[in-house]
Amino acid sequence: MCGIVGYIGDTVAAPVIFESLKRLEYRGYDSYGFATLHNNEFFVKKDKGKISDASFESFPEMLPGFMGVGHSRWATHGIPSEENSHPHLDCKGNFLVVHNGIIENYQELKSELKRNGHTFKSDTDTEIIPHLIEEFAELGFEEAVKEAVGRLKGRYAIVALSRNSDKMIGVRRGSPLIVGIKDSDKREYFLASDIPAFLDHTNNVMYLDDDEMVIIDKNKRSIKFHNLEGKEDVEKRLINIGWEAGQAEKNGFEHFMLKEIMEQKDTIMRALSQDEKSIESMAKEINNAFGTFFTGCGTAGNVCLAGEYIFSKVAGKHINFTVSSEFPNYHHFLTDRTLLIAVSQSGETADVLEAIESAKKKGVKIISLVNVMGSSLDRKSDYSFLINAGPEKAVASTKAATSQLALITLLAYACAGKLNEGKRLLIETASKVNDMLNPRYEKHIRRLAKKIHRKDNLYIIGRSLNYPMALESAIKIQEVSYIHAQGFAGGELKHGPLALIDKGTPCIALVAEDEVKNDVISNAMEIKSRGGYIIGVAPENNEVFDYWIRVPDVGDASPIVNIIPVQILAYHLAVLRGCNPDYPKNLAKSVTVK
Ligand code: M6R
């Protein structure tokens, strides 16, 4: 949801910001803007559209200077347009701000500022911030920003510049903001919503916590952190996050989505490289808790639902899943003996953070499964497991989902006192995924995509562990190909959805060699009898399948291998329908608004 960047260094800032913004485009891509500060003058360029479609050849002339900010927008208040693109300025053009998040009380502040004589050029909530800074200008830049943000309600990260100062100020409350530090001759500083923005330059970072302000001084090349509640000079550690620049590049693939699907050859194994003692002790926590919940959103939510089935089957334990946006409405029976397991790739999803915050108020212990080290969820949890999938940039979550599934399965086996058995199963699964992901397999799925890419509707059925994967298949297909796709529990068909089946309607049946196999096959038969075109994702062929995609038989790890061919299918459906799978319309990678 919007990407923001800031840069101070010895290199002309605009090209650095331009490249950083392109790397953050997955966070929002309906408009962009950037600004530099040179000789007490702002140079601003903004436009509607994607930053990757823009090209600039004369940066130093157009946007001179060695410090500046950039923004890639996912519209919340106001249509995508040049006026609504960030940065936004105050009346006199003295202060400039880029922002990610939502200012909940912007209407009342805007009315107040208008009464005080301020004029506004955009429909955004953001524009009130530079005007508020202007209101307090006589206090000096730092104090003015502090006073201004003191008036804001909501979740946000901002970066602000003043025409009359060589300082860049960032503030964080609920939305991510990270500092990258490169030690060259003189230190170079980066501020960004996410690490890939500056990974080309450095992987050494400092994290801002909520209600903290960072002040970077271009002349002194110094950095200091303040707590907004008044405590000056908060100490920060420089952390090496271990990611390499190449991990956030396409590396020869046409799209990040396909690259990330193919990376599952390795990422499942990486998810398993956990400290055994931590797994065992977490299993003990789960076994001793008085009620354990899973929470997550979208794909991570479907993984949680699969986790509910896996824990039930493998460990005989009931873990309740609630989508994060509903979790705060479901808190009445939480106690300090409850455990909440939050699953999130980014660790920045606002709904997930709200869910854990509401649970924490009741003394609930939080365990998280998260991909991004140092993310809000990682830092706010009592214990967090990193899934080690590396940067996931395509909006559609693929490798993170299978890594989360692998880790949840491992935890379930540990709870059942069978950690080694679980490990063996998952290592074998990883090796079978490695065999699956070959060019012939992909071609076979692309052939299917060619047959069905003009269809308007597509349905997916599964039972037991694979029912959540039917839901996940639907998300994958919807979000990148815009085909109307819906997933059902096989047994639910006869209660309504069967009425949707016409001659040739494609239906995917997710099958495993388990106790519900025959029931899913019977459901596929029911669809076929009404004219449906049956795509079987299964270890064995069956006469009911019109098209068979083989998957290995991996027992309780079947959700991992069954979702992968659907990810590949979703990708090819998108490409054949002329959609860019990396940038689905209306969506953004990390959803940092409620
Ligand atoms: O970063 P998170 O895992 O918390 O994100 C949750 C969802 O927004 C995410 O899974 C979304 O549903 C994906 N676009 C699905 O592919």
Image (tube, grey):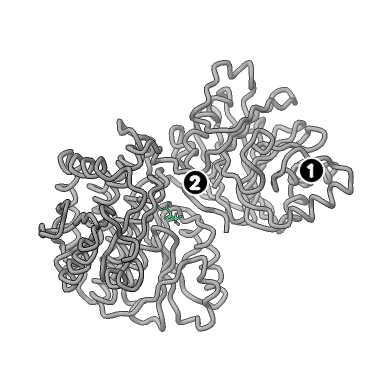
**Disc 2 designates what residue?**
238
Identify the residue shown where x is 19% and y is 72%.
519
Mark number for residue 131?
1
- Furthest residue toward right: 116
The reply to whether discs 1 and 2 touch (Cβ–Cβ < 8 Å) is no
Query: Residue 533 sits in which quadrant?
Result: bottom left
Quadrant of the image containing the C terminus: bottom right
In the picture provided, is 577 more to the left or to the right than 533? right
Split into quadrants, the picture shows ligand 1 in the one at bottom left
Can residue 205 be seen here? The reply is no
In the picture provided, is 49 more to the left or to the right than 132? left
Residue 109 drawn at (x, y percent): 79, 53
Identify the residue shown where x is 26% and y is 48%.
264
Nearer the observer, 433 or 279: 433
**Disc 1 on helix, strand or loop?**
helix
Eyeballing the image, is 265 above or below 355? above
Q: Residues within 10 Å of mark 2 (few under 14, many from 20)?
A: few
- Please, what is the three-letter code of the amino acid marked with disc 2? Leu
